[in-house]
Image: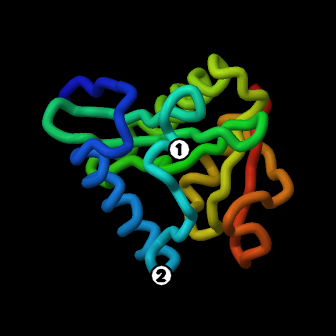
Amino acid sequence: MQEIKFRQADYTEPAVRALLADVVAELSERYGGSGDDTPIADDDFAPPNGAFFVADDGERLVACAAWRRHHDDAELKRMYTARSARGRGLGRRMLATVEESARAAGCRRVILETGDRQPEAVALYESAGYVRIEDFGYYKGEEGVLSYGKAL
């Protein structure tokens, strides 16, 4: 097994964009349509108002997660582990990386939207101390949306 390295990345890097295509494809499989229509700008994840992280196995990117400022909070976005790399704890490590970065940037909590067709994600968030909060984001009020938060 190759060593996985975590690093901050630019959201516009070609390798990042390739991994993001996988993210959206999987969301489309689960939910239909485009997978995710949430508006995201290229600079949403640029410091000091956010950060984008990847896990690199030396050959390709195998996981990612990001946060962007949402008032005093950090909104978790693009949390994903490639199918080939699942079951190795990368999601939990990536989540901790995002939380540490958001805390250092002065955010008071991490918030997120997920859906009821992502039970693995829900299980991860709940086991990491996230609790249900009032829906807040792009999919607020949509059937199946689940919003969570965790104080930092």
- The residue at the far top in this view is 104
- Amino acid carrying label 2: it is Gly
Residue 62, horizontal then vertical, whole percent: 29, 43
Res 63 → quadrant: top left
Q: In the rendered structure, which amino acid carries the disc numbered 1?
A: Asp
Whichever of labels 2 and 1 marks the residue nearer the N terminus, that label is 2
Residue 27 percent coordinates (x, y): 46, 68
Which color scheme does this rendered protein use?
A: rainbow
For the point 47% across and 39% down, the residue is 91
Look at mark 2 in the image and give the residue it sits on: 32
What residue does disc 1 label? 44
Q: Quadrant of the C terminus?
A: top right
Above-or-below relation of 3 to 17: above
Question: Which element type, helix, strand or loop, lies under badge 1?
Answer: loop
Q: What element carries label 2?
A: loop
Q: Which residue is drawn at 32% across and 45% down?
A: 12
Residue 71 pos. (x, y %)? 76, 40
